[in-house]
Image (cartoon, grey):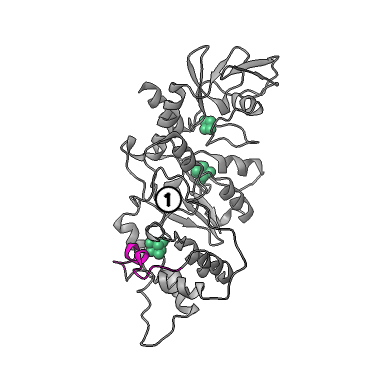
């Protein structure tokens, strides 16, 4: 428990445990990783040395080319020579080490580190409509494309997922149901699926391994009401009136965009699946979902942020003069624009790079 507390403190403070990488010279030649001799080069980290020998160590807050942070604990390994648990991404390799990447202690530590991150993570990876859809149509994505008038892309998406469910389970699950009526997902889907055939596409990817699906805990009633505000009631058609693109755009604008934009491409989710981390392991308050946008397609949801600092370091490395920054300390730490600035003050290309680099759905761009 003491180790966990220290780990949690490190994660919150963005402070790496003591053994930090140093880029100084070294004369080390080899160390042992999982019983194998692994060649060392000057200043290499445990993670880099292992990877060069084909031994993978999971990372979350680390990214090649950036100075290591060593704060998340996802890459914890054990040095059997000393019995110490070390962050592989931020620890300089040493010939005296005997690294075990999958010892029971290392695995337990990694799992606990991830579960701590999950303890206040909304984990509403997939929207309820998508989860209810037998064809797993990515409804929010389809509606987002329509709202952006990207009709061709929306049609491709719709046509890859057959319309085959007259019972409309998606609409029954829609979070707008009590807020002006469910989004008319089926009418939109049929409109697009009946459009001219899209060019042949590969079949949809199978759903990712899911350690947690959608509890929607982060969407409190007041948040929902705020999100639903000014979005109007469901489109009602007169007798015989056809559902048109204009109707589809109106409905798309009503969508609350539940779920996570990176549900199928989230490093945290992947690692949790691999480690068997469970969201319920540590009780924690879930941060309210607050979506901030820059008006140019960039979106930030602090509730999904794991404070890895990759966005900050990527922007610093790119030499951005205005960039996302850490604000506050400890449990109040968060990522935000610099003091006195807004997201739209940050150059769009900087935010696009941050969004691409962010390992969760905290930052995304259209
Ligand atoms: S509001 Fe949009 S994303 Fe949320 S459940 Fe309804 S259709 Fe799906
Ligand atoms: S926004 Fe993304 S990249 Fe930035 S600190 Fe949060 S999780 Fe990491
Ligand atoms: S501490 Fe190594 S990946 Fe986060």
- Counting the numbered discs, the total is 1
Front residue (pair 251, 231) = 251
Q: Is residue 165 magenta?
A: yes
Q: Is residue 319 above or below residue 205?
A: above
Name the residue: 42% across, 45% down: 210
The answer to whether the beta carbon of the residue marked 1 is less than 8 Å from any atom of ligand 1 is no
Front residue (pair 68, 215) = 215
Name the residue: 49% across, 49% down: 361
Which span is picked out in magenta?
163-179
Q: Is residue 95 above or below residue 102?
A: above
Tell me if mark 1 has few (under 14), some (14-19) or many (20+) residues whose alpha carbon lies within 10 angstroms of its own.
many
Q: Is residue 257 above or below residue 283?
A: below
Left or right: 5 with respect to 264?
A: left
Name the residue: 63% across, 14% down: 95
- Measured as percent of width and height from the top left, residue 313 is found at 59, 39
- Measured as percent of width and height from the top left, residue 118 is found at 39, 40
For the C terminus, the quadrant is: bottom right
The majority secondary structure of the magenta stretch comes to loop
For the N terminus, the quadrant is: top left
Front residue (pair 159, 109) = 159
Mark 1, residue position: 125
Quarter holding residue 170: bottom left
């Amino acid at each position: 428990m003491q180790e966990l507390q220290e780990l949690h403190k490190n994660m919150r403070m963005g402070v790496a445990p003591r053994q930090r990488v140093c880029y100084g010279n070294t004369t080390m030649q080899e160390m042992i990783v999982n019983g194998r001799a692994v060649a060392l080069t000057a200043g290499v980290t445990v993670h880099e040395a292992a990877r060069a020998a084909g031994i993978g160590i999971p990372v979350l807050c680390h990214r090649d080319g950036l100075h290591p942070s060593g704060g998340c604990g996802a890459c914890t390994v054990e040095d059997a020579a000393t019995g110490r648990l070390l962050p592989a991404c931020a620890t300089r390799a040493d010939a005296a080490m005997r690294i075990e990447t999958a010892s029971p202690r290392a695995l337990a530590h990694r799992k606990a580190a991830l579960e701590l991150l999950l303890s206040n993570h909304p984990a509403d990876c997939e929207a309820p409509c998508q989860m209810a859809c037998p064809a797993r149509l990515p409804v929010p994505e389809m509606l987002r494309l329509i709202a952006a008038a990207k009709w061709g892309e929306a049609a491709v998406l719709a046509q890859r997922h057959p319309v085959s469910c007259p019972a409309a389970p998606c609409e029954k699950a829609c979070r707008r149901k009590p807020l002006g009526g469910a989004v008319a997902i089926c009418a939109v889907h049929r409109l697009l699926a009946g459009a001219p055939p899209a060019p042949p596409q590969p079949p949809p990817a199978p759903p990712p391994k899911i350690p947690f699906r959608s509890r929607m805990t982060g969407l409190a009633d007041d948040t929902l009401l705020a999100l639903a505000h000014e979005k109007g009631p469901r489109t009602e058609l007169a007798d015989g009136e056809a559902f048109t693109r204009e109707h589809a755009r109106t409905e798309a604008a009503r969508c609350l965009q539940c779920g996570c934009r990176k549900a199928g491409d989230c490093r945290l989710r992947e690692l949790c699946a691999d480690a068997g981390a469970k969201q319920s392991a540590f009780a924690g308050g879930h941060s309210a979902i607050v979506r901030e946008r820059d008006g140019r397609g960039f979106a930030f949801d602090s509730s999904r942020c794991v404070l890895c600092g990759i966005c900050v370091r990527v922007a610093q490395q790119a030499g951005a003069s205005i960039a996302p920054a850490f604000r506050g300390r400890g449990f109040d730490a968060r990522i935000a624009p610099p003091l006195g600035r807004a997201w739209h003050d940050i150059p769009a290309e900087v935010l696009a790079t941050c969004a691409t680099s962010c390992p969760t759905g905290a930052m995304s761009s259209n």
